[in-house]
Amino acid sequence: MFYLFLLAAAVQVVSWMAVLRAGYRRGVEPDQQDPASGTAAVSVIVCFHNEQETIGPCVDRILAQVYPGEFELVLVDDNSTDNSASIVHPFEIRHGHVRLLQPGPTRAGKKDALAYGIYAAKHDFLVLTDADCVPASSHWLWFMADPLRRGAELVLGVSPYTADKTNMLLSAWQRFEATYVSLKYLGFARTGMPYMGVGRNLAYRRSFYERAGGFAAHADLPGGDDDLLVSATAQREATARVVHPAAWTYSAPQPGWRAYFRQRARHQSVGIRYPARAQWMLGGLALSHGLFYLLGFYLLFTPDWPIALAAYGLRLLLLVYVYATPYLRTDPLTYSGGATAGAEGGWKSKVFLPLTVAFFDAWVGPMYLYLAVAGLRPARNW
C-alpha cells in the first residue's frame, strides 16, 4: 500500500508539474506590430435553442468587438420554441453582417445546426461560441481569429463560469471543474497532444472541419461537436492556445444539480471515443488521483501517516500555485460581462483559493467516478 501510494503521488506531481502547469503559459497573442493582424475575414457562428434570456447579451457583445477585418455573425436557430428568434431578428435588420438561419428539423444536440451554420458561412475562418456566453472583452474575436491568419488550423480558447449566488456550492464546483478541464486540455495541447476543446470558445479553419469529415464519425452521439472533432483531427504543430483573459468567454453555470448531472453525463459519454493514447493518459491521471486520496487516507491510520500528510501538503501547494493563474485573473463574484478582462481576482478569491482547491480537489475522484458510470447510460435516459 505504501509504495503504491508513493507511485500515485509521483504520477500526480509529475503530471501537474510537466503538463497541467503548462496549460496557461505562453499562449498565442496578436502581434500588434504586424499591420496584417486582425485583418482576416471571419465567420462567427452561434447556435441557439430556447435561449431568449441570453441570446441578446451574447449578440450585443459580439457586435461590440473591435476587429479591423471583415466578420459576419451567423446565428442558427435550432428549432427554438420561445422568443429567441424574435430577439435575434432585429439584429439582422439593423446589421448587414448578421444572418439568422433556420435549418429545420435537427437531431438531438447541436451538431446538425452547427454543420448547417458552417456550410452557410461565407468565410473559411470559423470562430464558435454558445448563445449563453459573453466575450470577456471587445478584443475577444481578434485574439481568437488572428492565430488562424498566422497559420494555425485550430485555436483552443478558455471559457470559465460566472458565479451564481443562488447556488454558490454548485456554481463554485462548476467553476473549479471547468478550470481543471481547461488545465488538462491546454496542458496536453502545450505538450503536443491536443485532445479536446470547448465549443464555448473555439476556432478552426473550414479545411480542418472538412478534413475531419465534419461530424460524421460521431453523428450517433448528441455531444462531441467540439472534443471529438479536436481529438480526431488536431495536429500538434497546427494547434494554438489562446489563454489571455481578454480572449475568454463567460457562461452561466447550470442552475441545479439535476441539470448539471444531465449535462456532464452527456459530455462524459463521448470520452470512450477519444484516441487510445488520450484515454490512457487521462485514465492514468484519474486513477492516480483516486489512489492518492484512498491510500493516503488509509496511511493516516498507520505509522506512515507523517509521510502521507507531507505528500498531501506538498501536492496541495503545487495545485494552489497552478490554479492561481486562471483563478485570479478575473473574479467571478464581481464579473458582470463588462468587467475589465485581466484584472486580478478580488481579495476573497486570493484568501479562499487554498480552501477552494483543497475542498473541491477531494471531490474530483468520487464525482468523476459517478459521471463515468452515468455516461454509460443510453442517451434517451439523459
Image (cartoon, rainbow, N blue to C red):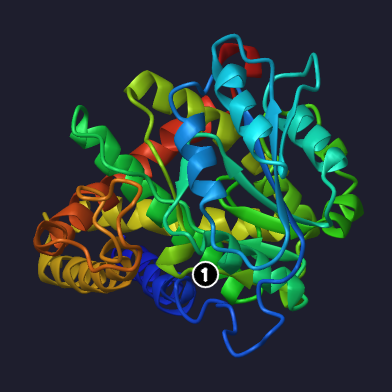
Q: Residues within 10 Å of mark 1 (few under 14, many from 20)?
A: many
Residue beneath label 1, please? 187
Q: Residue at x 59, y 66 (%)?
A: 142
Q: What percent of the width, then of the height, locates residue 258?
A: 38, 19
Q: Secondary structure at mark 1?
A: helix
Q: Is residue 193 visible?
A: no
In-front residue for pair 47/158: 47
Identity, as a three-letter code, of the amino acid under mark 1 = Gly
In-front residue for pair 252/64: 64
Residue 9 picture quarter: bottom left
Q: Is residue 335 left or right of residue 194?
A: left
Q: What percent of the width, then of the height, locates residue 270?
A: 65, 38
Q: What percent of the width, then of the height, locates residue 58?
A: 50, 39
Q: Is residue 19 left or right of residue 314?
A: right
Q: Residue at x 55, y 48 (%)?
A: 62
Residue 54 picture quarter: top left
Q: What percent of the width, then of the height, locates residue 89?
A: 64, 24
Q: Is 304 situated above or below 279?
A: below
